[in-house]
Image: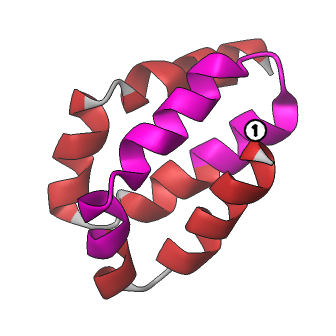
Amino acid sequence: MQEEGCLALSNIANGNAYNQRAIAAHGGISVVVSAMKAHSGHVGIQDSGCRALANLAANADNTIAIAAAGGIRVVILAIKAH
């Protein structure tokens, strides 16, 4: 379920500034980061989580929120692990 949720957020955020802001406003960034932390060994969740964070980061305000939520670290750990 975590993988599908991250993938859904990734797809919804892709190229849509309104959705990127809305996802962030409703706690989506921390949810993705939490899923990636909780399932660090699951390649599908790591892949979908990285995609979601990348699409959310298209919004400049979200880049700050991603960094503050620990998103940079989880992406680096995902890259190293997989």
Q: Is residue 55 left or right of residue 3?
A: left
Question: Quick check: 57 above or below 79?
Answer: below
Tell me the residue at 31%/82% (across/down).
17
Q: Does the segment drawn in magenta span residue 46?
A: yes
The answer to which of 22 and 55 lies nearer the viewer is 22
Residue 72 % position (x, y): 39, 27
Number of labelled discs? Answer: 1
Quarter where residue 20 is shown: bottom left
Question: Quick check: 2 above or below 21?
Answer: above
Q: Which residue type does callout 1 highlight?
A: Ile
Q: Does the segment drawn in magenta span residue 68?
A: no
| Quadrant holding the C terminus | top right
Quarter where residue 66 is shown: top left
Residue 80 % position (x, y): 68, 14
Tell me the residue at 75%/38% (across/down).
45
Q: Is the magenta stretch mostly helix, strand or loop?
A: helix
Tell me the residue at 57%/65% (across/down).
9
Question: Quick check: 8 above or below 35?
Answer: below
Magenta part of the chain: 21-50
Within 10 Å of disc 1 (Cα), the crowding (few <14, some 14-19, many 20+) is many
The answer to which of 28 and 68 lies nearer the viewer is 28
Question: Quick check: 17 above or below 50?
Answer: below
Q: In this view, does 43 lie to the left or right of 13?
A: right
Tell me the residue at 30%/85% (across/down).
18
Element at label 1 = helix
Q: In this view, does 76 lie to the left or right of 57?
A: right
Q: How is the image coloured?
A: secondary structure
In the picture of the structure, the residue carrying the numbered disc 1 is: 45
Residue 63 % position (x, y): 25, 49
